[in-house]
Image: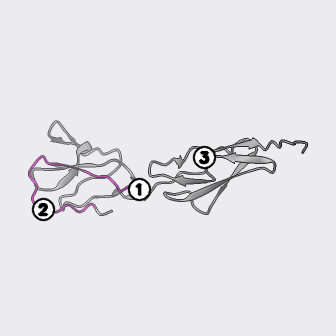
Amino acid sequence: MTLGISGNWSYGTVAEFSCITGFVLSHNLSLQCTENGHWCDTMLIHNGLWNDTNPENRTCLSSGEWSDNEPYCQLVDCGKNVTAPVHGKVIFGNETTFNSEAFVNCSEGYLLNGSHTLICTGDGTWDPHLPTCSVISMIFSNV
């Protein structure tokens, strides 16, 4: 993501940044157009006054550039925080990021109730909900 802002903007205009589905912004960012025409972090402007204390050490320089720590969009990672179903296991691929797949298998003698495939969603969760494993019952009849 590039934070370049072009066009004609008036003093006081606030620009908020976001990322496309599957990505999250490294840290929240709102920029405000200052009286000198530069964009500065709204966290640095309080009651219309410039505050040069920034907890993220990011300041708007007179050139309009950032001093450090420019935010970026990073791929959502669901992690491996899925508890395997009783009598089953979850198998993760090489990645646990947006649109990656994990697979659920049941132990021998058990039947999977639900989807075999889980997909990492844009909000950082695995979907659909974790299936269950139930014992396979056999019915014998005298024929």
Q: Which mark is residue 81?
A: 3
Three-letter residue code for mark 1: Phe
Q: Of helix, strand and loop, which one carries label 1?
A: strand
| Mark-to-mark CA distance, 1 and 2 | 26 Å
Q: Mark 1 Cα within 10 Å, few/some/many (few <14, many 20+)?
A: some
**Any magenta on residue 8?**
yes
Question: Mostly what secondary structure, the magenta segment?
Answer: loop
**Which label's residue is closer to the chain start, 1 or 3?**
1
Pinpoint residue 141: horizontal percent, then vertical percent.
Answer: 87, 42
The answer to which image quadrant residue 53 occupies is top left
Name the residue that disc number 2 marks: 7
Residues drawn in magenta:
3-23
Pinpoint residue 8: horizontal percent, then vertical percent.
Answer: 9, 59
Q: Quadrant of the N terminus?
A: bottom left
**Any magenta on residue 106?**
no
Tell me, yes or no, whether the two marked residues, 3 and 2, touch with CB atoms within 8 Å: no
